[in-house]
Amino acid sequence: MHQCPVCDADVTISEDPVEGELLECEDCGTEIEILALDPITLGEAPDAEEDWGE
C-alpha cells in the first residue's frame, strides 16, 4: 500500500501504474499524481489551469 501525501491514508494503485496517472484519495478527496514508478512516488496533483482557448 502507498500513502496519500496529504492525509497519510492508504491509497490503492492499479497493478499496472503509469507515471502521471491521476488518482483520488478515498479519505480526503485529494487528487494525487503518480510522480515516479521506481520506487512509486505519489504527490498532490497540480491544479489544472484553464487556457480559455488561448
Image: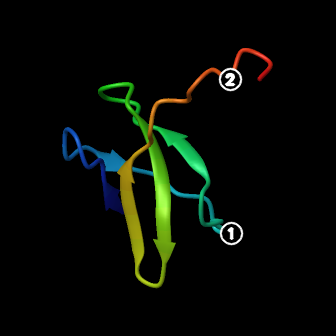
**Residue in front for this viewpoint, 19 or 46:** 46
Q: Give the x, y percent position of residue 48.
A: 55, 30
Tell me the quarter of the image containing the N terminus: bottom left
Q: Give the x, y percent position of residue 4.
A: 30, 47
Question: What residue is disc 1 on?
Answer: 16
Name the mark nearer the viewer: 1 or 2.
Answer: 2
Question: Is residue 30 depicted above or below 15 in this figure?
Answer: above
Q: Say what secondary structure mark 1 lies in.
A: loop
Q: Mark 1: few, some, or many residues within 10 Å (few <14, many ≥20)?
A: few
Label 1 is placed on what type of residue?
Asp
Q: Which mark is residue 51?
A: 2
Name the residue located 19 percent from the left edge and 38 percent from the top edge.
7
Name the residue located 44 percent from the left edge and 39 percent from the top edge.
46
Label 2 is placed on what type of residue?
Asp
Question: Is residue 51 depicted above or below 46 in this figure?
Answer: above
Q: Say what secondary structure mark 2 lies in.
A: loop
